[in-house]
Amino acid sequence: MSKFKKLILGVIIVTLSSQFYIDMLFSDFRFTCAIIALGSFLFLNRDISPIIMSIIVSISIYIWRSIILFIANGFIIEVTGSYIPEIFFYIVYGLVLFILIRKKDSLDIGFCFFVTLLSDFSANIIEISIRIIYYNYTFYFNMLIYLLVVALIRSIAILIILIIIKYYRMLLLTSEHEKRYRKLLWLTMILKSEMYWMSKNMTKVEEVMSDSYKLFEEIRDNKNPDFWYKRALKIASDVHEIKKEYQLVVRGVSEITENRYKDSGMYFKDISKILEEKMQNEIRHKNLKVYFSIKRDSDFYTNKHYQLMSIFRNLITNAFEALSKNKRGSKITLIHESLGDKHVFKVIDNGCGIDKEDLEFIFSPGFSTKIDYETGHINRGLGLSLVKDMVENFFKGKIEVESSLGQGTCFQIYIPKKEIEVNI
């Protein structure tokens, strides 16, 4: 669902829920359930701006109440005028909520309760103040107690809703993980048989290489020239057989991963959670002093989650390798932005960076700057090459890199929305 459709749906839900209310303090001062719906909706949809949402909601509820009043009693300007302070209530609620959560990447339940309580109480104070100043209502101290109690009740209601939805989502996610795990076990079993044939072919490849070298030696030393053509024909025949067997393996793997076990797709927020969990486990396992975070601009649904995850995994793994194992303050951040008709993904680290002379070669197959001088192991250098190929040829996008030696690296990926999003 697009952000606009989600916003409209939220406004409708909140507006309708405003019809469930209790009149307290004054005849036209209502404690409605709308704020419970609004608070819950904003916490569950962080991509929706609280300010924009609250402004639209305030206008929508004002119009809705005026229409109901007109149908029931006709147009009464004094009554419709008394609804105006409620507009400021919703706007202040959204503003306070926005200020408190705007810099938070994740929100725990306790903080959500504090934010809703403060937002609700502050908004009610503003509304009461307007009514006292401009509508000549009488102030008494018990008002503050009433307002605090109502804010407390509504905040607890929002808290309960968030907890229920959180555990419901966890239940769904656990069920989905179990299904995926069973698929994974079955796929692994089948792939093991395919790997057997690949291992068997490795022996054949070594035999062909040996025969080829022997033929080279015979040609070089001019030995047995009458048998050269026969040996060359045998080598060609062996290579052809190896090729046929690898074609069968590739076809078998393709059928397994693409046809027999099609996945329905995933939301980006779920991809983010799985990726974050995996990376945090790796940080703990390797005892790294690294802060890893993911910042999402919006959510979308895709059936290309495997490819997307593969891109992120390669880039983040590269970022891990660029960081010093013992350096404090090491950070890796995956940032998502929705810009026009494109999704932009950035993987940023504050590691060792890449030399300017190497930047133009980092996407070349086999190129690597990662050498372990203690073991002599060198990275095979296929990760970034595959990432570039997948971004450009599979997603029809582009990848850019900016890096400063000793300061860090930023990979930026631009993917057209039509190539990645799926409507459900």
Image (cartoon, helix red, strand yellow):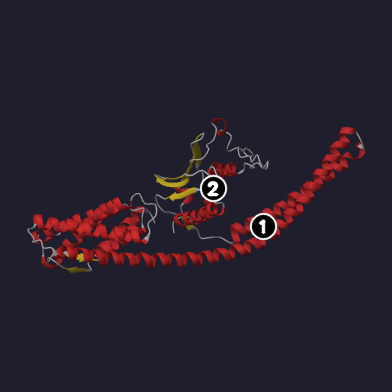
Q: Is residue 75 left or right of residue 111?
A: left
- Name above or below for residue 326 compared with residue 256: above
Which corner quadrant of the image does residue 168 belong to? bottom left
- For mark 2, give the secondary structure: helix
Q: Residue at x 42, y 50 (%)?
A: 296
Residue type at tag 1: Gly
User: How many residues crowd around disc 2 within 10 Å: few (fewer than 14), some, or many (20 or more)?
Assistant: some
> What's the residue at 30%, 52% (across, down)?
100
Residue drawn at x 59%, y 44% as measured from the top left? 383
Residue 375 appears left or right of 288: right
Residue labelled with disc 2: 311
Gap in Å between the C-alphas at discs 2 and 1? 24 Å
Residue 273, position as x, y percentages in the image: 47, 56
Residue, disc 1: 252
Type of amino acid under label 2: Ile
Q: Residues within 10 Å of mark 1 (few under 14, many from 20)?
A: some
Of the 4 image quadrants, the one containing the C terminus is bottom left
Q: Position of residue 132 (x, y in %)?
A: 10, 58
Q: Quadrant of residue 25?
A: bottom left
Q: Quadrant of the N terminus?
A: bottom left
Side of 138 relative to 340 (left or right): left
* Dot 2 or dot 1, earlier in sequence: 1
Spot occupied by residue 277 in the image (x, y as percentages of width and height): 50, 56
Residue in view at x 16 percent, y 61 percent: 66
Q: Looking at the picture, tell me which residue is in the foreground, 144 or 243.
A: 144
